[in-house]
Amino acid sequence: MPDARSFARPADPDDDAVLLRDVVVRAAGEDRRPSRTILTVDGLRLTERRIGVLGANGSGKSTLLRLLNGLQLPDSGSVTVHGLDTRRDGRAVRALVGFVFTDPLSQLVMPTGREDLELSLRRSVPRKDRAARAQEILERFGLATLADQSVYELSGGERQLMALASVLAVEPRVLALDEPSTLLDLRNRELLRRTLAELPQQQVLATHDLELALDMDRVLVVDRAEIVFDGDPASAVAFYRELSLSGTP
Amino acid sequence: MNGRGTPLGEYLPGHSWLHRTPLGLKAGFLAVLGLGTFWLSSWAASLAVLGLVVALFASIAPGWRRTWRLFAAPAPLLLVVLVFQSWQLGPGRGISIAANITSCLVAAAILTLTTPVQTLLDGVVRLASPLRRFGLDPERLALLIAITLRSIPYLLGTFSSVREAARARGLERSPRARVLPVLIASVAYAQRTGDALTARGLGDATEPEADDPAFN
């Protein structure tokens, strides 16, 4: 198996990059004291537009994504996104990094898509312009006819697109997507795949979908709380297949 | 599927006269009704008020399915209230209390069905703005109310799903099989919702520039 350090790129402060330095995340054990290590990253600099993260369930890839938005703070080390520290500048980082969850129902906090979009816009768009702006976004994503339906009545793909639209409404510069295609059928997965490919945002996407991983510019493989591979998509997928089939994870 | 238990908290797009009625009037009516029911002890008066509120509800053309869901979800609880209060205070008082609770439920449904959530949030923010000087963030309060409204149908739906799951396993008589999963699901739901709000920056204190009345 390749050594993680041989693939890790040297950390270098850069205002247009996502940087992780000496990051350690531990799970809270008894008495809320940190115990088991769930992710360590010595140094990582992400500048590519589309970055995939592959790994078995529980390997640490969701933790890696949550670090980018400040949903998870490191127990030691630091995470900076475009020059902003997730610990120090939490609010600004959350405005910069949109987070898409696996289950869109966890994300859509309002009864309908339109209401959820308008909720996203409350802090950035004056009240008189909110409805028009929401309508514009819904039309851009082809969701206008579904906007007033209960989110429970939408198909999985429609819900995921609606959740994505709600996140994109505030125009983040980076998107962290945690297994966005896991609950989707083939047709909806293709729809999501095409939509993501057209977005201008930098994307960091955790997935089990190897085809989707091949669309990325760079892919990381996470195993047992460490990045064990970092390279081009084809090599990363081949490495991940070998790792999975060898029974190591 | 969770979330289809009751129309309470849903918005029904439309242009009925109640949709066009200002939020302040509708909220005022709900408040007067809620307080007024404390003084209603005659079963005939309570039923008359219920009839009026149901007529208002019917005027927004909510549809049979939504009407059924509105009354079916709280029916078991209302039945318990009716029987218990009739036993404790007499049938007249039992009918009055059950009718008063139903009137409030229907009036609350009218308010949410005819008012977009954003308008409700704007109303709460305006109403709570004076409390800012005591350290209360009106945006957060409005968000709290919106999330509560969103959670009612979800949690009622969870009750229904868990009941079906217990029945499928022949455990419909086990309180543990019917209550514990609801508690666990509710905590998980709260955690997921909290994560979603945090990720979107919606739980953060209001930005100073959002104090501009144009944003509220």
Image (cartoon, coloured by chain):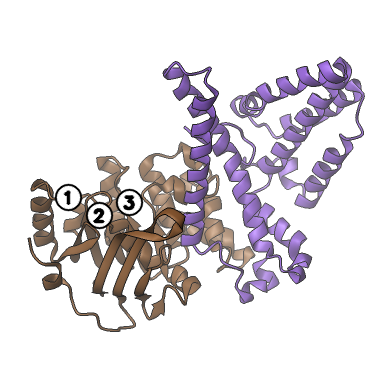
Chain colours: A brown, B purple
Mark 3 — residue? A180
Vertical comparison of A203 with B187: above or below: below
Question: Is B134 or B44 nearer to us in this picture?
Answer: B134
Q: Around disc 2, counting alpha carbons within 10 Å, would you say few (fewer than 14), some (14 to 19), or many (20 or more)?
A: many
Question: Is A47 or A13 nearer to us in this picture?
Answer: A13
Q: Work out whether mark 1 precedes mark 2 in sequence or the reverse, and give the earlier one.
A: 2
Q: Work out whether mark 2 precedes mark 3 in sequence or the reverse, and give the earlier one.
A: 2
Q: Position of residue A10 (x, y in %)?
A: 19, 80
Query: Label 1 vs label 2: CA separation?
Result: 8 Å
The reply to whether discs 1 and 2 touch (Cβ–Cβ < 8 Å) is yes
Q: Tell me: A133 left or right of A67.
A: right
Mark 1 — residue? A249
Q: Position of residue A144 (x, y in %)?
A: 47, 49
Subunit bearing disc 1: A
Q: Tell me: B143 left or right of A223.
A: right
Q: Tell me: A30 left or right of A130.
A: left
Determine the residue positioned at 8% across, 64% down.
A2
Query: Label 2 vs label 3: CA separation?
Result: 17 Å
Identified by mark 2, the residue type is Ser
Q: Position of residue B156 (x, y in %)?
A: 57, 33
Mark 2 — residue? A59
Determine the residue positioned at 70% across, 71% down.
B213
